[in-house]
Image (cartoon, rainbow, N blue to C red):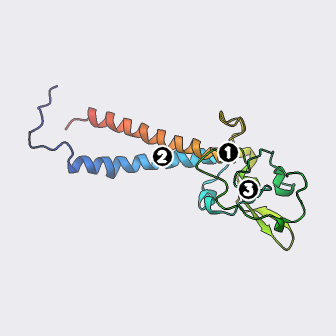
Amino acid sequence: MTRKPRKIDDHLVSGKLLCHAYGQMGEIATAAGFFTYYTIMGVYGFPAASLIGLANLTAYNPGNSYTWDNYTPYNPNAFFYGAYLPPGVSTNNCAAYQSVPNYPNWLSTTNGIVDLRQVFLNCNTQTGVFTQAVNWASNSSCYWATISSYTNYPVCFTTEALFYAQSGYFSTVVLVQWSNIFACKSRKV
């Protein structure tokens, strides 16, 4: 209340405000948001290095279907790493399977319960063996206690982890903006 009113020719948005909002606070908000995003993805089994190009990898599934969505425990010593095999499906030749384009669906919960360690694979047609296409985090580094309220299955190594990370990114940016508002409103000229 002790401050004089602004001059009538002063703009509400000035170069100084833009420089502060986008040049300084915008960078801080973005960095904080990305830190939260990568931390949450890491907690659910996706190391930061594995996220680059993950959506473009070849994905196989036993049903050779875009909508294939079965939860089975991961087994590093089993064919398809433990993925559910429909009755009568061959387990000795990876060449019998085709990669499924645009699988899994990262933008919806269509494939929300699929353990992605069972689908992002490389097929060696000469030996008939699948190998991992991604260097996943170890089981011990994944927070298995989180059960999805939507699917009732663990969030680790699933596409649902992305929704948690996106929510964390958004929440972090909003919190930084709130702190920015308080800082700007309480600052004296």
Q: What x and y, as percent, mark residue 96? A: 83, 66
Residue pictured at 62% horizontal, 62% vertical: 56
Q: Farthest residue toward the left?
A: 8
Residue displayed at 75% across by 60% down: 60
Q: Amino acid at mark 2?
A: Gly
Q: Which residue is mark 1?
A: 112
Q: Which residue is mark 2?
A: 33
Q: Secondary structure at mark 3?
A: loop
Image point (47%, 42%), residue name: 170
Ranked by sequence position, the earlier of labels 2 and 3 is 2
Q: Is residue 92 above or below residue 105?
A: below
The image quarter containing residue 165 is top right
- The three-letter amino acid code for the residue at tag 3 is Ser
Residue 174 in the image: x percent, y percent? 42, 39
Helix, strand, or loop for circle 2?
Answer: helix
Q: Residues within 10 Å of mark 2 (few under 14, many from 20)?
A: many
41 displayed left or right of 21: right
Residue 183 placement, left or right of 126: left
Q: CA distance from mark 1 to mark 3?
A: 14 Å
* Circle on res. 65: 3
Q: Which residue corresponds to the image point at 66% horizontal and 45% vertical from the top-left?
A: 44
Foreground: 101 or 114?
A: 101
10 Å crowding of disc 3: few (<14), some (14-19), many (20+): some
Query: Which quadrant is the N terminus positioned in?
Result: top left
Q: Nearer the viewer, residue 35 or 146?
A: 146
Which is in the foreground here, disc 1 or disc 3? 3
Locate residue 94 relative to residue 34 in the image: left or right: right
Horizontally, is 173 left or right of 118 in the view? left
Q: Earlier in the sequence, mark 1 or mark 3?
A: 3
